[in-house]
Amino acid sequence: MSRSDVLVDANWAEANLTSPGVVFVEVDEDVSAYDKGHIPGAVKIDWKKDLQDPVRRDFVSKEQFAKLLSERGISNDDTVVLYGGNNNWFAAYAYWYFKVYGHRSVKLLDGGRKKWELESRELSTDVPQRAKASYSAQEPDTSIRAFRDEVLVAINTKNLVDVRSPDEFSGKLLAPAHLPQEQSQVGGHIPSAINVPWSKAANEDGTFKSDGELTSIYSEAGLDAAKDTIAYCRIGERSSHTWFVLREILGNQSVKNYDGSWTEYGSLVGVPVAKGA
Amino acid sequence: MTAGGGCGAPDQNASVDVGSETVISGRVVSAGTPVAAAYVRLLDASGEFTAEVPTGDGGNFRFFVKPGDWTLRALSTAGQGEQRVSAAHGLNEVDLPVA
């Protein structure tokens, strides 16, 4: 994998809005954003309603994912171009999720919704009518998804990258600064984790920094290229952004996203927790 | 709340109990007119990124912070702006002009 395989820019997107075999999909933290205007022809996936099991804390099943994509008119051979707000956090989460279920051709729109809006490119409120497809999902690829037990084993042996803000890492805050702080689990981080906030990897307009800049950010922070890596945040979407950088842009092979993240780890009984910078 | 369990932006117009929090709440304005769909980012005292939200129809935004010095930065189709804020416990209201 390299940058050109996994990212498209806004000019490419604009030139391919109606290309056969290309489907634009918006995924936002603010699930009402799509309804106010989206890239013409884009379909919407709701990160919560469509991608989370309604009862358990987990993905929807392989069958439910196949049903969702079939209903949205997405085929196995389509190139899916994901974009969203908040610097592509949830679009990166959806990218990782599509990869877990084995979709072959997925790309992120560099800069996401923010860059598109700031450049005053066209937004539409028309909801496209796509013919239903017959999608078949693969078995989940657990080589890119980490669960709590392997995170515990990874302490002091693998790279653990905590991509939350420094105040969340140190335990001063339990959530990002634009959210209420009412969560009840303990604050802090997984022992031996390094703290590289996701935002280090992005420019102000939401695009990803250059390969050279990205490489030095993580090596200066102490990421050991010879070791496997697990990224985490609070619920797994900011860490999808970093997972995307490390595995899809920089091409590190063994990188997992721990989507249980701090909301799971910080609520576990009996596990070690570190506080402070 | 649009995404109470997530890391996403909550409703920027919802009321909030400021009794126990330190809140920076404000409006992005261009020549006195509110700017919707602006991107406001919160930088800490060392200039590091902390959070970002888009503004609602009234140009409103809100951050929960620790008391201290912060910088707000706005990007919008109406221009850019930057403003320093010394936040005290409770509600800190600010207008953030862009040009």
Image (cartoon, rainbow, N blue to C red):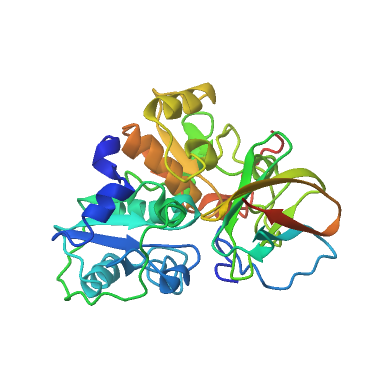
- Quarter of the figure with residue A195: top right
Q: Is residue A242 above or below residue A31?
A: above
Q: Residue at x 52, y 55 (%)?
A: A235
Q: Is residue A272 visible?
A: no
Q: Residue at x 65, y 54 (%)?
A: A175
Return the x and y of residue A2 as percentages of the image width and height: 27, 34
Q: Residue at x 42, y 63 (%)?
A: A58
Q: Residue at x 23, y 68 (%)?
A: A66
Q: Is residue A68 left or right of residue B28?
A: left
Return the x and y of residue A254 as percentages of the image width and height: 34, 35
| Along the line of sight, the residue nearer the viewer: A144 or A80 | A80
Q: How many marks?
A: 0
Q: Is residue A61 above or below residue A81?
A: below
Taking the view exactly as shown, the residue that stands out farthest to the front is B31
Which image quarter is the N terminus of chain A in?
top left
Which image quarter is the C terminus of chain A in?
top right
Q: Is residue A30 visible?
A: yes
Q: Is residue A228 above or below residue A204?
A: above
Return the x and y of residue A274 as percentages of the image width and height: 67, 38
Return the x and y of residue A43 as percentages of the image width and height: 30, 69
| Along the line of sight, the residue nearer the viewer: A11 or A7 | A11
| Along the line of sight, the residue nearer the viewer: A140 or B59 | B59
